[in-house]
Every structure is written in structure tokens, then in C-alpha cells.
Amino acid sequence: MLPSDHRLPGHALSRLASGGGGADAVRHLAAPQRSKRLLNVVGTMRLAAEAGHPHARAAEHAYDVLAEIEKKSPAAVRGTLAHPAVGAWAARTVRSLEEGGPPPDGQCDPARLGAVAAAAALKSGMPCEVQVPVSGGTIMLPSLGRIDLGGGQDDGLADLVVRADGRVEAGDLCLRPGAGEQRGWRPLRRLQTADAGLRVLVDDLDAFRWSDPAEVGGRLGEPELRTWRGSLDAAWTMLRAHHWTIAEETQALVTVLTPIRGPAQGMNSASSGDLFGTIGMSAPPDGRWLASTFAHEVQHGKLNAIQDVVTLLEPDESDEPNRYYAPWRPDPRPLSGLIQGAYAYLGVAGFWRRQRAHEADLRPHIEFAHWREAAHQVTGTLLDSGLLTTEGEHFVGAMRRTLTPWLSEPVPPAAREIARQEAEAHLRTWQAVNGSAPAHRL
């Protein structure tokens, strides 16, 4: 299990900078993410040994088990390590071990590598024996589901045995994780579109499924899951019909949806750099808004991965890095937030630009007019900042070259006026809350 060095080919980076890229470009981004996760897995084992962590030997044994499984079933190991929550656990555990103190939530246990090995063993059909951490009487097998040991089980390490026939033994339980929900086993559920073109896991169990535990929702009930499935099918139909590049990129990048808490109206969505492949979202109100959410969050996922390989911004040494106006946020933002938002809303504007040809109401026109202006405005702020690297100048310049001709595309006057009013209302609110004019040209 060895990581590789990676560079983004120039043609892929150019397509990505323009706002698109397609499945081929996403594959170029996924390869460095695999190496990043593997480096963190290896780092977890080595740092635990160097620190004399009490679970270091359990982690080392789990790594040896993974290496043995990889010899016979590399796809099982590759697929398990690709699960976003595995990457988030490994990254957070490495940071915790490097800092030398106990993690604030007590979850960053290097022995969780045993649970990763057990999940890979189940996928490969190979037997193994590992030690795994127990938290709250449960054992999480990343990408598969959670074992509930029941009352009376202390937290700490537990022995877990995977048999060649797919049985798992832990504590007093013997179960078959592949046989659906049963006593002691809660599986992760999969959503699949009617044409099987898009398949995603709903991760509503793993402690590492999201970056902020306060934002996650609980286990989705079956009625909620049916609502998500219906919205996913409608969104996928829309993307396949009118937004082929977004459909390709969604299919290639998004593997997990994680339920997070939503607002009183509408929906929330977000992405995280440690969770490549995951979109966090509250319940989507309908397929159209879920499709636009994919357009938005896939852009974040791409840019997070790009910035793992290419440096776009120089460090901001000023006393007030959070000083810039973002037309989509209530608070001043750093340049790193601006480039993320501009790239995301470039994708959003492109989505509504195409979608308005297929709907009769004004809302797609309003969204297009609003976000083309906002993203274009912020690319100007970025280019004026003096803190873009050479690669950053090229990248943001390509974004602006996509956006500039969109500004002259006709929009119904009523839609243009509503978009202007919405933008001005946002700016007035921002100034009232933050007490000053934005630190860039308007």
C-alpha cells in the first residue's frame, strides 16, 4: 500500500479552471485523494508507535491485515479506504497525534484501523481477527454500518472476528452484515436512481461522517429516506437531460450523502476538504434544488482537491485576513473563502443559465442573473488582491473568462430587477451587521 506523487495535467487543470472538467478531470483529482488517505493511514500507524499510544500495536496489526487483503483483493481495500469517513478519521487522527494531546471528542483512536480492515475483509471474503474501538457500546465498520453490542459493554478495545463465510463475531454477537438490518446491526443504506446511473451511500451513523458533530442529523427514517430517493431521482433526470457535465462529475465524485441539520425554510448543503466524495445536506425540498446543490457542492469538492495539488493563494500576512465581502455570506471572508465561493457560484450560475431554457417561470433567470454578477465581482476582488500565485492568476483568470460573456446574455427585465434588489439587500444587511463598506471595489 504505497502512495504516489501526483500532478494535474495542464489540459485537465484548464478545463477545471473554466468551471467544468467532466469525469476525466475528476478522475485526475481522485488519484491524489487516494494517496492522501493512504499517507494519513500510514501516518496514523507510525505516529501512534512513535508516541507510545496504548493502541499502537492494534493499529499496526490492522495495517498488516489490510496489506494481506490487498494482495488478494486490492479493490476491496481501495474501496474501503476511499470511503470519505475513513479519510476524515485518518486526517484528524494524524493531526491529533502530531499535536501530542488527546482529541477533544475521544474518537481519534488509531485502533479504528482495525474496523477499516474488518470492512475490507468483509468485502473481500477473507477472514481476519482484529481489535477495534468500542464507543457507547457500538463498533462502526466504515462504509458498511454499525454493530450495536448492547448494554454493559465498556468503551475500549474489543476483539472482532470476520469469518470467511461473512459472519462477524464481536462480544456476544454473531451476525451477517450483508443480510440487512438485524439485531445488533444497523447498515448504511444506499440510494440508487431508477436507471442505476447514480448510486450513493447515506451515511447517518459514522462519527466521522461530518466535520462538525453539532451539524449532523440523526438516522433517517424510512419515510425520509423515500423522500430523499424521490428527490435524487428527479435531480438525476434533470442533470442527465440538461446538464451533462455536472451529471458526469456528480457520478464520478459523489459517493456519500450525509444528512445535516436544515434551516426553517429551504435547505443547507456543505462540503469538507477531509471528506472528498461526501456532500452534507439537509432534506432536499425537490429535485430541482437538489440538482442545483450538486452543481454547487461538486464545485467545492473539485476545488478542495485541486488545492491539495496546486497552490492558488499566497499566505495573507495582514492583521485582518477576514475582511472581504462575499455576496453569498453574512460575514467578512478571507481570500480562501472567496475563491471557494466564486468557483461554487460559477457552477451555480452555469446550472441556472442552462436550466432557464427548460422552465417557464422567472426564478431560473433570477438565479442566473444574481450569481453570474456575484461570481464575476469576486473574481475581480481575487485578481486585485495581489495574493494569487502564478497558477492562481491563471485559474481565476479562466473563471473570469467564462463569466464575462455571460454578463451580456439577455435576461427578462423583471428577473434582472429582482436579482438586483436581492443583491443590494444582501449588501445593505452585510454593511449593517459588519459596520463598514466591503474592502474591495463594487
Image (cartoon, rainbow, N blue to C red):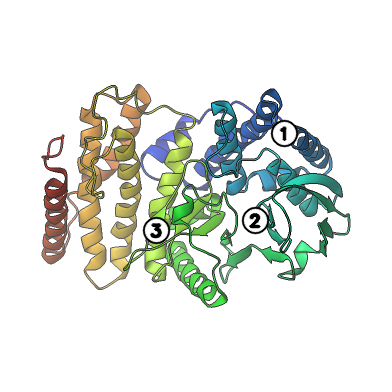
Instruction: Measuring from the top left, give residue 409's x and y in whole percent.
Output: 19, 53
Q: Residues within 10 Å of mark 2 (few under 14, many from 20)?
A: some
Mark whose residue sits in front, 3 or 1: 1
Instruction: Measuring from the top left, give residue 308's x and y in whole percent.
Output: 48, 32
Residue denoted by label 1: 54
Instruction: Measuring from the top left, give residue 19's x and y in whole percent.
Output: 37, 44
Q: CA distance from mark 1 to mark 2?
A: 19 Å
- Secondary structure of the residue carrying tag 1 is loop
Residue type indicated by callout 3: Thr
Q: Nearer the viewer, residue 405 or 237?
A: 237
Q: Earlier in the sequence, mark 3 or mark 1?
A: 1
Quadrant containing the N terminus in the rendered view: top right
Residue type indicated by callout 1: Pro
Give the label on residue 293, or none.
3
Give the label on residue 136, or none.
2
Q: Can residue 76 be seen?
A: no
Indicate the quadrant where residue 130 lies: top right
Q: Earlier in the sequence, mark 1 or mark 2?
A: 1
Mark whose residue sits in front, 2 or 3: 2
Q: CA distance from mark 2 to mark 3?
A: 34 Å
Give the label on residue 403, or none.
none
Q: Which residue is pictured at 44% across the width and 55% down the height?
A: 215
- Tell me whether the residue at label 1 lies in contact with that at label 2, contact meaning CB atoms closer than 8 angstroms: no
